[in-house]
Every structure is written in structure tokens, then in C-alpha cells.
Image (cartoon, rainbow, N blue to C red):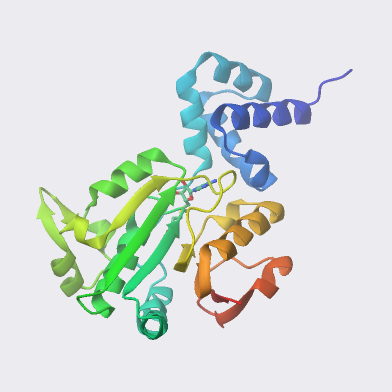
């Protein structure tokens, strides 16, 4: 039997999946190839079989492969207008709903939170809108432990904070050497936790909103449907789903969510 390049690639993917526990078959094939090829190129390796052998010998390389697959680009208030919509429309409407059930606790999930800019943005918007005696609980999860470590430190350079208004910067950050650190980090009640969207069940239930932005683009249709069903189950009735600007909901899932803002890619659990 002739072993093709495709066989070697599929063997490599199975190997990485088995060693890391990440279901790589959930990622888009072209994306996966591009990222693995880039890593191999950096090492001067030009065939998948050789890279599989390297992974067998070198435990550290597995981490490097996962790093290559997980792109961590993020920003505070990324794309600005979805966060304005969250602040001006969603938070007041969540508050109204909560009042009816005599609750003053709101719960959010930032799924694939990268270095923390997204959950801190959610926390800041919430603190700006909700009354003092209301509590906000935010789960911030990612597959990448290095990101989670950085996120929980809450330390950012001036450039990383460029999207924030000076008044918000002053209110929520304090200088720390040449960087800025989130002030009163505990008060924002963010729980950072490792969680893999491909293989693990949803983190919890009854979220008022789930932010899952700019990760679905890496997944294939089957994985998207699985993940969106999970979000459906983890949202409270009428809870919101916020996805990335360039992302769309697969047709199979559309009956579960109704659009709130097509432009901002915000949906409501039906
Ligand atoms: C481009 S960042 C998006 C960060 C943030 N949500 C935003 O929109 O700015 C994508 C993040 O998805 C994470 N990620 C990739 N695959 C994942 C998976 N299977 N489960 C959880 N997180 C994953 C990466 O580690 C990375 O931090």
C-alpha cells in the first residue's frame, strides 16, 4: 500500500489530537494545514511524517504545535460597536428582566477569552451600567493556559489599552512599571478557567450572555453546530449570544437564536 502525503497529514492530526485531547477534526481543514505548515516551516521540516516523529521525541513541541494552532489576537472592546451595543442596549434589558425575577446577579461567559481583554471589557461595561449593589460573575475560558495566566495577571501595555477612553483607563487601571494593571481585580469577579470548546461540555448554565468571538472562524460546520448547541443550553431563557464580526450562524442553528442586531452579530436565545 502506498502511503500518501494526505495519509501522513491525517496520522499527524490524529497524533496531536490524541496527545493534547483537543479534537482537531473540529477545525477547518485548510486552517489546520496552514498553521501546522507554518510551524514546520519555522523548524525547517517539510514533511508530515518527519514532524510526527519529532512530536514523539519532544514533549515540548506538542505545546508549540498547539500554540501554532491557537491564534491569540485580541483587543479591549474589540470592534468597539458590539461593546457599545452591549452597554447601551443589552445590559439595561438584562437588568429589567432580572428585576422581574428579583435578582441582582448577572452572569456572563467569555468563551475563548485569549489574554483577557474580552472578559475585562465585559466587566468594565457591566460596572459602568449596573448599580453598585448588583453582582457580576464572569467565566473566562480558553484552551491556552499561557493566555489564561497572562489574563489573570491583568497586566497590559499602554498600546494594548489604546481602545479605552482615558477616563475608563484611569478608573479601572493603575500604573505598574511601564505597564498598567487592572485595579481591584477581584471586584470584577472574573473566573479564569481552562476549557476546550471542542471536547468539553458547557461550563455552566443560566448565563445572561455568552461572548464567543473570533474562534468559530477556525472550526468546521460540525464543530460550530456542536458548540452553538452547547451555548444554547448554557444560556438562560432570553440570554444573548455575541459572535465575531466576520462570523455567521450555520443554517441548522438559526431556529435556536433570533437576531437582535444583525450588524453587531448579537442573537437572543429563542
Ligand atoms: C483570536 S482569539 C479571540 C479572542 C477573543 N474572543 C476576541 O474576540 O478578541 C481565539 C482564541 O480561541 C482560543 N481557542 C482556540 N481553539 C480553542 C478551543 N478548542 N477551545 C477554547 N478556546 C480555543 C485560542 O487559544 C485563542 O485565545
Q: Quick check: can you spot residue 76?
A: no
Task: From the viewer's side, name the closer residue of 95 and 39.
Answer: 95
- Image coordinates for residue 242, horizontal then vertical, percent: 50, 69
- Image coordinates for residue 198, horizontal then vertical, percent: 59, 46
State the residue lying farthest toward the right. Answer: 1
Q: Is residue 124 above or below residue 17?
A: below
Q: Quick check: can you spot residue 82?
A: yes
- Image coordinates for residue 131, horizontal then vertical, percent: 23, 79
- Image coordinates for residue 202, horizontal then vertical, percent: 53, 53
Name the residue at 46% across, 53% down.
Answer: 112
Q: Is residue 161 above or below residue 168?
A: above
State the residue lying farthest toward the front. Answer: 102
Task: From the viewer's side, name the closer residue of 105 and 188.
Answer: 105
Q: Is residue 7 left or right of residue 127?
A: right
Q: Is residue 129 above or below residue 245?
A: below
Q: Is residue 216 left or right of residue 193?
A: right
Name the residue at 53% across, 79% down.
Answer: 263
Q: Is residue 186 above or below residue 265?
A: above
Q: Quadrant of the C terminus?
A: bottom right
How many labels sit on residues? 0
Task: From the viewer's side, name the closer residue of 116 and 32.
Answer: 116
Task: From the viewer's side, name the closer residue of 85 and 64.
Answer: 85
Q: Quadrant of the N terminus?
A: top right
Dividing the picture into quarters, in which one does residue 267 lie? bottom right
State the residue lying farthest toward the top. Answer: 57
Amino acid at each position: 500500500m502506498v502511503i500518501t502525503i494526505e495519509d501522513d497529514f491525517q496520522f499527524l492530526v490524529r497524533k496531536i489530537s490524541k496527545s493534547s485531547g483537543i479534537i482537531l477534526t473540529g477545525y477547518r481543514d485548510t486552517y489546520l494545514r496552514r498553521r501546522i505548515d507554518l510551524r514546520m516551516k519555522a523548524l525547517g521540516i517539510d514533511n508530515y511524517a518527519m514532524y510526527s516523529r519529532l512530536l514523539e521525541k519532544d514533549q515540548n513541541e506538542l505545546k508549540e504545535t498547539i500554540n501554532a494552532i491557537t491564534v491569540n489576537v485580541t483587543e479591549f472592546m474589540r470592534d468597539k460597536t458590539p461593546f457599545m451595543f452591549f452597554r447601551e442596549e443589552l445590559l439595561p434589558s438584562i437588568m429589567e428582566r432580572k428585576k422581574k425575577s428579583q435578582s441582582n446577579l448577572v452572569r456572563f461567559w467569555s468563551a475563548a477569552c485569549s489574554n483577557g481583554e474580552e472578559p475585562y471589557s465585559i466587566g468594565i461595561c457591566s460596572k459602568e451600567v449596573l448599580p453598585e449593589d448588583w453582582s457580576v460573575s464572569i467565566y473566562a475560558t480558553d484552551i491556552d493556559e499561557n493566555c489564561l495566566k497572562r489574563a489573570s495577571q491583568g497586566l497590559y501595555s499602554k498600546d494594548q489599552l489604546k481602545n479605552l477612553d482615558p477616563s475608563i483607563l484611569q478608573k479601572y487601571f493603575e500604573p505598574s512599571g511601564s505597564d498598567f494593571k487592572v485595579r481591584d481585580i477581584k471586584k470584577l469577579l472574573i473566573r479564569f478557567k481552562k476549557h476546550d470548546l471542542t471536547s468539553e461540555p458547557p461550563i455552566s448554565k443560566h448565563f445572561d450572555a455568552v461572548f464567543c468571538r473570533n474562534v468559530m472562524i477556525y472550526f468546521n460546520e460540525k464543530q460550530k453546530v456542536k458548540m452553538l448547541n452547547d451555548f444554547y443550553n448554557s444560556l438562560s431563557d432570553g440570554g444573548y449570544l455575541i459572535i465575531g464580526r466576520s462570523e455567521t450562524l450555520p443554517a441548522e442553528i438559526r431556529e435556536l437564536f433570533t437576531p437582535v442586531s444583525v450588524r453587531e452579530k448579537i442573537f437572543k436565545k429563542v
